[in-house]
Amino acid sequence: VIELPWLFSHYAVLRQARAADRFPHALLLHAAEGAGGEPLALFAAQLALCREAAPPCGRCRDCRQVELRQHPDLYWVAPEESKLIRVEQIRELSEQLALTAHGGAATVAVLQPADAMNAFAANALLKTLEEPRPGTTLILVTAVPSRLPATLISRCQRLRVRTPERAEALAWLTSQRGPHDWDAVLDVIGNAPLTAAALDPEQVTRLRQETLAALRAAQAGGLDIAGTAERWARGEHFELRLACIENWLTGRIETCAAGAGGGDGRGGEMRSSTHLSYVADAANMAPLLRLLDAVYQLRRLALTAINRSLALEQLLWQCARGSAA
Ligand SMILES: [Zn+2]
């Protein structure tokens, strides 16, 4: 399991809990996307399943099997094609948990991201949590705990996973992948070093420039919107493209906010009259926020190429008009 420097305090807390025989029966890891929730879940699984004197040793058969996610007492539940964790998956997990503990006494199940459970799945999991089997640890990893039922959260010990500072994230990325403009990559995807580490930084920069140029062209009325939407929808970096659009929108919203507050002068031409500029910026802001919300929704959906194309086309028209229908 990769050890992330910004998670050291969490490793220590979990180690202490295990040493004191207080390892939680249900653990909720609240971690921003790409900030280390998954590696921390693997660490916790090793901690629960390693039988050496100072767990996790990282070298024994249990530790290595967890690392490869092939441990017979580790269940890893992730969304399927639909981007959802379905109730059938939870029922299957519950049945397996009721049967098991193979070699040792401990069993671990990781749900990641736990907020991918629909209401039926969450309800089924709640039943498992209500009748805990000794030695079982459930680990729920989520960036958005508010998407989980409160009844479920209340039964978990909650750990707010630290998000690294930008400088820490940049140092780690450079140590792992060598020097690149990682700052620009994190500007696009947010402070998500593990996501960034899996990307080609040059490609992200190119994609961002291309996307911004197209959005500016759309605003100027000079973009073949349908053609661009179709091309982007077929491209392999749909999510990254949406991240670029989100980034652009966030920038515009910040500009509006600065203008509305009389702010730092970035409001530009709208500041000719203080009162009027306030009205204009507030009016500009609402559609931008609606657009931003539309992008959030799109990023969470599993879409076919045709649906992607239609959604992008609508989005680009709205960006061009600067308003959401
Ligand atoms: Zn071990």
Image (cartoon, helix red, strand yellow):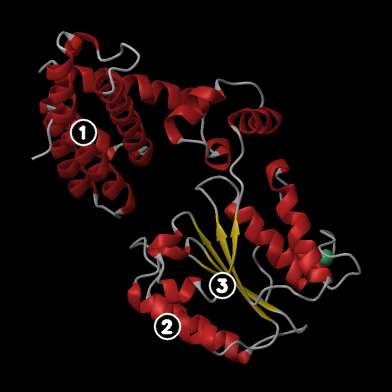
Q: Pick whichever, 199 or 270, lies toward us.
A: 270
**Residue pointed to by mark 3:** 156
Q: Is residue 274 above or below residue 54?
A: above
Q: Secondary structure at mark 1?
A: helix
Task: Give the alpha-carbon distance from disc 3 to disc 2, as whole Å.
Answer: 15 Å
In percent of width and height, residue 262 lies at 28, 17
Q: Is residue 85 above or below residue 166?
A: below
Residue 227 in view here: no
Q: Secondary structure at mark 3?
A: loop
Q: Is mark 3 within 8 Å of ligand 1?
A: no
**Residue pointed to by mark 1:** 288
Q: Which mark is residue 70?
A: none
Residue occupying the far front of the picture: 275
Left/right placement of residue 62 relative to residue 179 reads right
Q: Which residue shows up at 13% across the image and 30% down it?
A: 283
Q: Pick whichever, 279 or 140, lies toward us.
A: 279
Task: Give the alpha-carbon distance from disc 1 to disc 3, as whole Å.
Answer: 37 Å
Q: Which residue shows up at 63% across the image and 61% down it?
A: 41
Badge 1 amino acid: Leu
Quarter assignment of residue 227: top left
Quarter assignment of residue 14: bottom right
Left/right placement of residue 8 relative to residue 39 reads right
Badge 3 amino acid: Cys
Q: Is mark 2 within 8 Å of ligand 1?
A: no
Q: Secondary structure at mark 2?
A: helix
Q: Of callouts 3 and 2, which one flags the residue occurring earlier in the amino acid sequence?
A: 2
Q: Of callouts 2 and 1, which one flags the residue occurring earlier in the amino acid sequence?
A: 2
| Dot in front, 3 or 2 | 3
**Residue pointed to by mark 2:** 124
Q: Residues within 10 Å of mark 3 (few under 14, many from 20)?
A: some
